[in-house]
Amino acid sequence: MDQEGKGSDDVPAALHDPRAHRARRALRYLDGHPGASNREVAVALSAKGGALVARLIPPARDIEADANAGISPEELAVVKRCLRRMYANLTNRPAVSRSARPRRAAI
């Protein structure tokens, strides 16, 4: 994470989900302003969102440090690269209809 607590290239796809974005705006964590075109909106953290980030980043950094303990930067880079590839594999996978999914056996 960088100084503001934003991951440089570890931005979860959920941050770009329009439904999640609308929910964050409804909770007043984000402020939106018209962008350069009628299809764009400039988004920034609201005061409430900034306060939440300030509260969540320190414990998140502590947890991240605990999780990464004993792992070299090179090993961590490999893990992150593999997890990104796995995520991309799953998000680019064709959807399976409910009827085509295997049913769970009754217990």
Image (cartoon, helix red, strand yellow):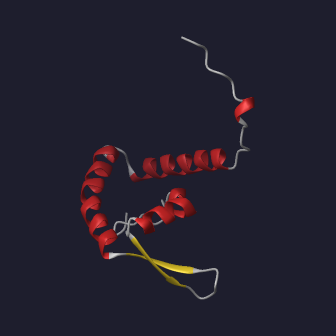
Residue 84 location, x and y as percent? 56, 51
Residue 106 falls left or right of residue 48:
right
Can residue 35 be seen in this snapshot? yes
Q: Residue placed at 74% from the left, 30% from the top?
A: 99
Residue 8 location, x and y as percent? 45, 66
The quadrant in which the C terminus is found is top right
Q: Residue placed at 25% from the left, 54% from the top?
A: 59
Residue 43 falls left or right of residue 82:
left
Which is nearer the eye, 25 or 79?
25
Which is nearer the eye, 12 or 95?
95
The quadrant in which the N terminus is found is bottom left
Q: How many marks?
A: 0
- Residue at the extreme top: 107
Can residue 9 be seen in this snapshot? no
Q: Residue placed at 54% from the left, 51% from the top?
A: 81
Which is nearer the eye, 81 or 95?
95
Residue 62 location, x and y as percent? 25, 52
Residue 12 location, x and y as percent? 50, 57
- Residue at the extreme front: 26
Which is nearer the eye, 27 or 92?
27
